[in-house]
Image (cartoon, helix red, strand yellow):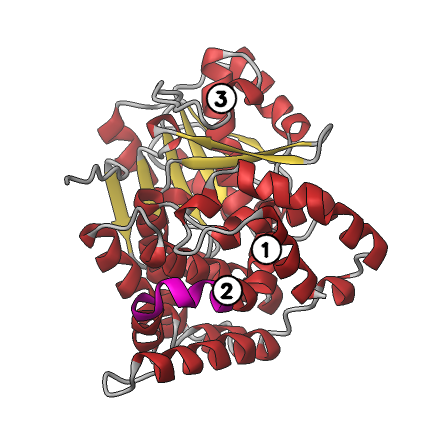
């Protein structure tokens, strides 16, 4: 049984990697990039820094900064229009997962037209849009190395999963120095997102020896460093470990798929506007507890890779320590319950059957070691309260 591995053509990793954009553009034969980002990246001066670096090489780059957290069909439309009416040959996607996901969608729609729903899974998008150079500024989504994008249809509150080589950036510039200014909340949410990617890739039914190696390496980097960066955002060594861990976790899940946590997370985000990493964090302990019986040894490996269990611990002891760690991590990183986030109890409970249907429809729960019924998904949602 062989496994197909899909990666960016170029990866530049390490401090200062983002300054290599002119060289990357030249190697791709591109000279008219559009920077797609958000207003925070403009305020922090990151967009200007890239424009200045490009200008030194006589390359002019315009900025589209109207992307939003958890991108929607309407939020990307202005970017699509910008690409259609401009003379661009490439996109520089600068920011967290939302700007990069937005850029992926804009790249395809801007070149081929149609609506986002036309490209929704199970369709596999292999068409090549405008080439994307991804420059992540959070250590979490791994979007710079994945063949996925998620865009919400705000008319139905559905988070549409879109999949294919067409969404894979051509280049990824992984520069941890861009994460040094991240606030603690975003650091925590994106960090748990990365941990979830690694764990789900490792226990996924689509896991392979290749994705396993990336997932385990990611957990070894994230496990000891997530608390450190939450408490001290200036800790360069911990920031570097988290950034590399996030990218490796992205490679792992892009090639092994995610599972039940992500399947259940997307409907919470779409319906109640909970940031993606935060809804993953809310779910990770309960879903892990549900899933352990069908993949006990794999979850024990996760505990050992994260550094919370030893090689001498039995599988049961390791998994007990893993559950203790996931709950303690949420406590220390101040992950709220749905109620503490401000969701109305009646709204949450009324929507559970619909959210369960949406979770199953996404396909992700089928990759889980223990595949749930709709009733079991509702039971897990109830545990969150």
> Could you give the CA–CA distance between mark 1 and mark 3, rounded to whole angstroms?
30 Å
Marks 2 and 1: CB-CB under 8 Å? yes
Counting residues from the start of the chain, the first of labels 2 and 1 encountered is 2
- In front here: 232 or 52? 232
Is 41 left, or right, of 176 in this rendering?
Answer: right
Q: Quadrant of residue 213?
A: bottom left
**Disc 1: which residue:** 376
**Closer to viewer: mark 3 or mark 2:** 2
Across and down, in percent, residue 167 comes to 40, 30
Q: Can the viewer see residue 205 in this picture?
A: yes
Image quadrant for the N terminus? top left
Q: Which mark is residue 289?
A: none
Is 4 left, or right, of 285 in this rendering?
Answer: left
State the residue at coordinates (58%, 73%). Answer: 330
- Asked which secondary structure carries label 1, the reply is helix
Q: Is residue 297 magenta?
A: yes
**Disc 3: which residue:** 119
Marks 1 and 3: CB-CB under 8 Å? no
**Dot 2 surroundings within 10 Å: few (below 14), some, or many (20 or more)?**
some
In the rendered image, the vertical position of residue 17 relative to residue 123, given as above or below: below
Counting residues from the start of the chain, the first of labels 3 and 2 encountered is 3
State the residue at coordinates (76%, 67%). Answer: 340
Is 105 left, or right, of 215 in this rendering?
Answer: right
**Closer to viewer: mark 1 or mark 3:** 1
- In front here: 365 or 4? 365
**Disc 2: which residue:** 290
- Asked which secondary structure carries label 3, the reply is helix
State the residue at coordinates (32%, 46%). Answer: 256
> Could you give the CA–CA distance between mark 2 and mark 1, rounded to whole angstroms?
9 Å
């Amino acid at each position: 049984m062989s496994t197909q591995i899909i990666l960016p053509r170029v990866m530049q990793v390490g401090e200062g990697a983002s300054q290599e954009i002119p060289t990357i553009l030249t190697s791709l034969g591109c000279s008219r990039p559009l920077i797609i980002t958000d207003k925070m990246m403009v305020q922090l001066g990151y967009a200007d820094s890239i424009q200045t670096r490009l200008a030194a090489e006589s390359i002019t780059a315009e900025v589209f900064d109207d992307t939003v957290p958890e991108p929607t069909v309407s939020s990307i439309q202005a970017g699509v229009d910008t690409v259609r009416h401009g003379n661009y040959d490439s996109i520089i996607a600068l920011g967290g997962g939302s700007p990069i996901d937005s850029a992926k969608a804009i790249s395809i729609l801007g070149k081929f037209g149609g609506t986002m729903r036309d490209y929704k899974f199970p369709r596999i998008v292999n068409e090549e849009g405008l080439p994307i150079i991804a420059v992540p500024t959070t250590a979490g989504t791994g979007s710079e190395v994945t063949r996925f994008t998620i865009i919400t249809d705000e008319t139905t509150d559905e988070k549409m999963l879109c999949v294919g080589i067409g969404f894979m950036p051509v280049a990824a510039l992984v520069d941890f120095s861009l994460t040094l200014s991240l606030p603690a909340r975003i650091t925590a949410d994106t960090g748990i997102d990365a941990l979830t990617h690694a764990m789900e890739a490792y226990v996924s039914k689509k896991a392979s020896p290749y994705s396993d190696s990336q997932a385990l390496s990611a957990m070894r980097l994230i496990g000891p460093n997530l608390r450190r960066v939450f408490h001290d955002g200036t800790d360069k060594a911990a920031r570097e470990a988290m950034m590399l861990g996030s990218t490796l976790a992205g490679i792992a899940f892009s090639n092994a798929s995610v599972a039940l946590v992500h399947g259940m997370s997307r409907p919470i985000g779409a319906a109640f506007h909970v940031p993606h990493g935060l809804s993953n964090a809310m779910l990770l302990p309960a879903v892990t507890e549900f899933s352990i019986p069908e993949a006990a040894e794999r979850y024990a490996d996760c505990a050992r890779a994260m550094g919370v269990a030893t090689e001498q611990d039995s599988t049961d002891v390791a998994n007990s320590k893993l559950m203790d760690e996931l709950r303690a991590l949420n406590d220390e990183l101040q992950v709220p319950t749905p109620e503490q986030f401000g969701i109305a109890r009646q709204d949450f409970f009324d929507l559970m059957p619909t959210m369960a249907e949406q979770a199953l429809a996404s396909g992700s729960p089928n990759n889980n070691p223990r595949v749930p019924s709709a009733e079991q998904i509702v039971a897990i949602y109830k545990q969150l309260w």
